[in-house]
Image: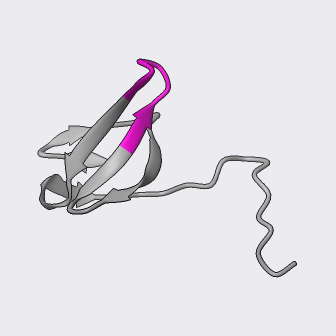
Amino acid sequence: MSISGETLGGVNLVGRLGDSYVLWDPARKTTILVPVADVRKLEIAQAAGAVSDAGR
């Protein structure tokens, strides 16, 4: 995720709250709120080994 020229790695997208993304930073054990307008690029990757129940 890139915010105002800064790249955030290792954070988990929790969801969206109004006009902000809610992120969890497990390294710092903190929640980050980022205004949608400040996000230039959002890449979401599925964790290895994650299983989806979709289609079952």
Q: Is residue 24 left or right of residue 3?
A: right
Q: Is residue 50 left or right of residue 24?
A: right
Residue 27 lies in magenta, yes or no? yes
Of all residues, the one furthest to the front in this rendering is 18
Give the image quarter of residue 53.
bottom right
Residue 15 percent across, percent down from the top left: 42, 56
Residue 25 percent across, percent down from the top left: 43, 30
Q: How is the image coloured?
A: one colour
Give the image quarter of residue 9.
top left
Q: Does residue 19 sit above or below 33 in this rendering?
A: below
Residue at left 35%, top 59%? 16
Q: Is residue 46 left or right of residue 31?
A: right
Q: Does residue 53 sit above or below 8 in this rendering?
A: below
Q: Does residue 24 sit above or below 14 in this rendering?
A: above
Q: Which residues are magenta?
A: 23-30
Residue 51 percent across, percent down from the top left: 79, 58
Residue at left 76%, top 75%? 54
Taking depth in this image into account, of 27 and 18 the one nearest to the observer is 18
Of all residues, the one furthest to the top in this rendering is 28
Residue 4 percent across, percent down from the top left: 12, 45
Residue at left 41%, top 18%? 28
